[in-house]
Image: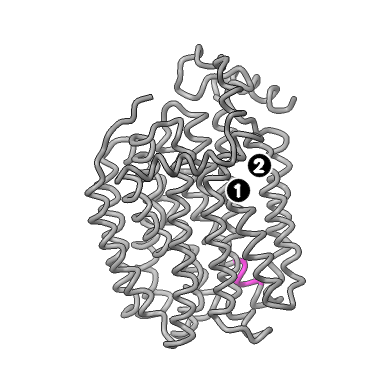
């Protein structure tokens, strides 16, 4: 088997196969998130070609965000029942195929099916839950750092591809970026099929940083896995929902999605167009955010291993809120927006590592995938609300400013909510 042979070679060189798994997960989340972010560059071209309003197109994007999030808890079930490799491969095939077929749309309902349902379900089968599962299964130490790196790939993929996509759209039309992204997704799927494994014990290894004795799987592991059913996410939700900590995490992550994916990722290029900034420079600002997000999220993972995650979340949400409140009064030039890109980009999704840390502390490592799946659902419901709400604001009020002010104020509320979370290390 290619994975076993590579693991054997790496072990002889003092390297752990867990980093290969982390690398495959990084690529998966990078290109899946790039596919998720790509429609943000196509709002105006689609409206011009088909005559659809911003709110109509945003309804398909809102459905995509909602399904992306609501699939989270069930993605954890799928990974338990069918394995990480199988789930990730199917998800990449769905997204790659959906990208190819999206070039054939002629009706609004085609867009809803392909970019709303197919893209939402496919990307939701992995999402940030994949990062949480991989970091907790394959790493006994450096979990915060690994989660930060994987989270950074998810956010950066949504942003970094947009300048290239905008450039291609400007020259060859909105269908041009679909084929390259589909090929990349299918290429990563081939690597996943070859080298991805579900657990370290599949290769006779212990998680990175654990004692070698833990490489031997417990006899009860297999029955426990098969005991997972489609009711399991609802059981996990019922148990978690009795704890105030769950609702605080859910609420703050709702606001996180409201103020990032659904608002800025989806509408930023259109927002800049309202102020006379062309699509390619606007996408370049998003790419700059992606670069600084990569730095900020990895740093957040490092910090969450060492400092109080509640205080980190408080700072992140407060600074993000101030930046969004300032944005409507900013100068919409490439130079003027650079300051916003640096400040906001460092904080784009730095909230994920401390949120996962608090979830694991409160509910235990065994339940972190399922519980965080529901918390992440809150994030994407918030993104869906912002994607549709900002589009509605643009259609009815001819301005995105109300949506920016609402999101900024919500972030300040989330900063206060984060400090009310009670920390307790879960038994087991």
Label whose residue precedes the other's in the sequence (2 or 1):
2
- Image quarter where the N terminus lies is top right
220 sits to left or right of 291 = right
Mark 2, residue position: 87
Separation of marks 2 and 1 at Cα, in angstroms: 7 Å
Residue stretch in magenta: 164-168
Using the rendered image of the protein, determine whether residue 214 is visible from the camera's viewpoint: yes
Mark 1, residue position: 125
Q: Are marks 2 and 1 in contact (CB under 8 Å)?
A: yes
Q: Residues within 10 Å of mark 1 (few under 14, many from 20)?
A: many
Residue 166 is a magenta residue: yes
Magenta stretch, overall SS: helix
Q: Residue at x 43, y 75 (%)?
A: 334
Q: Is residue 241 above or below residue 227?
A: below
Q: Position of residue 278 (x, y in %)?
A: 52, 80
Query: Is 102 in front, or is 161?
Result: 102
Using the rendered image of the protein, determine whether residue 288 is visible from the camera's viewpoint: no
Q: Residues within 10 Å of mark 2 (few under 14, many from 20)?
A: many
Query: Is 300 in front, or is 399?
Result: 399
- Image quarter where the C terminus lies is top left
Q: Position of residue 126 (x, y in %)?
A: 58, 46
């Amino acid at each position: 088997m290619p994975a076993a042979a590579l693991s054997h070679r790496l072990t002889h060189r003092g390297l752990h196969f867990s980093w290969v798994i982390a690398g495959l997960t990084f690529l998966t989340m990078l290109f899946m998130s790039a596919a998720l972010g790509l429609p943000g560059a196509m709002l105006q071209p689609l409206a011009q070609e088909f005559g659809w309003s911003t709110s109509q197109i945003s309804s398909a994007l809102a459905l995509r965000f909602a399904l992306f999030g609501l699939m989270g808890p069930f993605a954890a079930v799928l990974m338990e029942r069918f394995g990480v490799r199988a789930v990730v491969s199917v998800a990449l095939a769905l997204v790659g195929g959906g990208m190819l077929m999206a070039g054939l749309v002629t009706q609004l309902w085609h867009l809803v099916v392909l970019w709303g349902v197919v893209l939402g379900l496919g990307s939701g089968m992995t999402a940030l839950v994949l990062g949480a599962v991989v970091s907790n299964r394959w790493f006994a130490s450096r979990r915060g750092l690994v989660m930060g790196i994987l989270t950074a790939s998810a956010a950066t993929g949504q942003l970094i591809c947009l300048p290239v996509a905008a450039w291609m759209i400007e020259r060859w039309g909105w269908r041009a970026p679909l084929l390259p992204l589909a090929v990349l997704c299918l290429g990563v799927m081939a690597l996943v099929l070859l080298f991805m494994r579900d657990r370290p014990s599949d290769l006779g290894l212990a998680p990175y940083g654990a004692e070698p004795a833990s490489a031997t799987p417990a006899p009860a592991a297999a029955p426990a896995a098969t005991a997972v059913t489609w009711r399991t996410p609802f059981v996990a939700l019922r148990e978690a929902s009795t704890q105030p900590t769950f609702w605080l995490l859910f609420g703050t992550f709702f606001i996180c999605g409201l103020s990032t994916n659904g608002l800025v990722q989806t509408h930023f290029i259109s927002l800049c167009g309202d102020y006379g900034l062309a699509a390619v420079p606007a996408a370049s600002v998003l790419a700059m955010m992606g670069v600084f997000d990569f730095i900020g999220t990895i740093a957040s993972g490092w910090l969450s291993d060492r400092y109080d995650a509640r205080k980190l979340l408080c700072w992140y949400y407060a600074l993000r809120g101030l930046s969004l409140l300032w944005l409507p009064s900013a100068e919409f030039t490439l130079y003027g927006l650079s300051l916003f890109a640096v400040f906001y980009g460092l904080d784009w999704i730095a909230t994920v590592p401390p949120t996962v840390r608090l979830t694991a502390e409160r509910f235990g490592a065994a339940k972190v995938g399922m519980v965080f799946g529901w918390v992440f659902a809150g994030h994407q419901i918030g993104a869906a609300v912002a994607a549709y709400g900002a589009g509605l604001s643009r259609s009815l009020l001819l301005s995105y400013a109300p949506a920016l002010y609402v999101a900024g104020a919500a972030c300040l509320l989330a900063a206060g909510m984060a400090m009310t979370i009670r920390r307790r290390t879960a038994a087991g």
